């Protein structure tokens, strides 16, 4: 099968998969300048430990759901999605039409990034770098970050110091709504603590907005220059066996590019063959 160039694949990728949506820029919660105080470094370290323990036994999982893309002028495109993943960085995603016919499959085995367009028979293989991921997802996100999000975990950048801020202007006495039976807006008053991770030069690498139960509701990843790489919003969670995993989440950047994902069916601790994460040219 003739391999197509990346330029030939881009129009297909950006129209029907996780790779194109342009909407109004989403604004992250503002940290009040007059109503917050820093907790001790010990509390920040304990918060990181709590987050890293969440679903730490969940290593393989798969599911079915729906993905929604927003095009220019607010146009919405939705399609079915099937996915399988294994910690730390292996995943496979297949997008299908309403009739169930596969449109695109994308996979990462930790080293290589693969894509097949079934309509044209195109095949693409490149190193699984952040820049190559961006060519598909329109977002500078690592495959391991996507796997963490699907597993209900917080992706962590390598950092040197952690600061925990309690913003009293955002605090409430209740965390109702952000649970297994309903969605709560991450931009609302349920957020009370902000965990900020920095490098040794003091550059902010990551912000994690938490409620009082240490549930991450918004995650923001930054470059060392302070540019937002991507923002994650958890809108609704679900209980699957012993794990609390997303039901609905959104990933976007400041240009409004990204996607919303509904994980309607979820199988935890699934049996997964390593060969699933390697794609070959269609015959």
Image: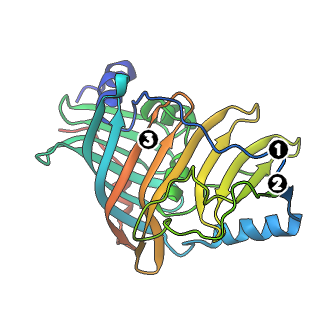
Q: Position of residue 252 (x, y in %)?
A: 51, 38
To which quarter of the image does residue 194 belong?
bottom right
Q: CA distance from mark 1 to mark 2?
A: 7 Å
The secondary structure type at the circle numbered 2 is strand
Residue indicated by mark 1: 33
Few, some or many residues within 10 Å of mark 3 (<14, 14–19, 20+):
many
Which label is found at residue 113? 3
Which label is found at residue 64? none
Which label is found at residue 36? 2
Above or below, 118 against 154 in this view is above
Few, some or many residues within 10 Å of mark 1 (<14, 14–19, 20+):
few
Residue at point 63% right, 45% down? 220
From the viewer's side, name the closer residue of 103 and 171.
171
The secondary structure type at the circle numbered 3 is strand
The secondary structure type at the circle numbered 1 is loop
Quadrant location of the C terminus in the rendered image: top left
**Mark 1 or mark 3, earlier in chain:** 1
Above or below, 253 against 189 in this view is above
Asked if the residues shown at circle 1 and circle 2 are in contact, with their CB atoms under 8 angstroms apart, the answer is yes
**Mark 3 or mark 2, earlier in chain:** 2
From the viewer's side, name the closer residue of 251 and 29.
29
């Amino acid at each position: 099968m003739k391999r197509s160039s990346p330029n030939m694949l881009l129009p297909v990728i950006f129209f029907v998969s996780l790779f194109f949506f342009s909407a109004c820029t989403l604004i992250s919660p503002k940290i009040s300048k007059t109503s917050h105080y820093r907790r001790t470094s010990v509390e920040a370290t304990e918060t990181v430990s709590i987050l890293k323990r969440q679903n730490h036994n969940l290593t393989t999982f798969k599911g079915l759901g729906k993905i929604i893309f927003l095009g220019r002028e607010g146009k919405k495109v939705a399609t079915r999605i099937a996915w399988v993943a294994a910690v730390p960085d292996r995943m496979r995603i297949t997008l299908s039409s309403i009739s169930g016919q596969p449109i695109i499959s994308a996979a990462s085995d930790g080293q290589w990034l693969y894509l097949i367009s079934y309509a044209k028979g195109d095949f693409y293989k490149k190193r699984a770098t952040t820049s190559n991921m961006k060519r598909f997802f329109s977002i500078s996100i690592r495959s391991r970050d996507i796997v963490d999000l699907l597993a209900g975990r917080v992706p962590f950048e390598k950092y040197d110091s952690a600061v925990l801020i309690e913003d009293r202007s955002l605090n409430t006495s209740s965390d109702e709504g952000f649970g297994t039976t309903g969605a709560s807006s991450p931009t609302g008053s349920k957020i009370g603590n902000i965990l900020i991770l920095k490098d040794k030069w003091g550059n902010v690498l990551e912000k994690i907005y938490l409620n009082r139960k240490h549930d991450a509701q918004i995650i923001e990843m930054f470059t060392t220059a302070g540019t937002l790489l991507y923002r994650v919003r958890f809108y609704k969670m679900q209980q699957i066996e012993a794990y609390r995993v997303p039901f609905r989440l959104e990933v976007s950047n400041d240009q409004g590019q990204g996607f919303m994902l509904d994980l309607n069916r979820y199988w935890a601790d699934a049996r997964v063959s390593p060969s699933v994460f390697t794609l070959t040219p269609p015959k």
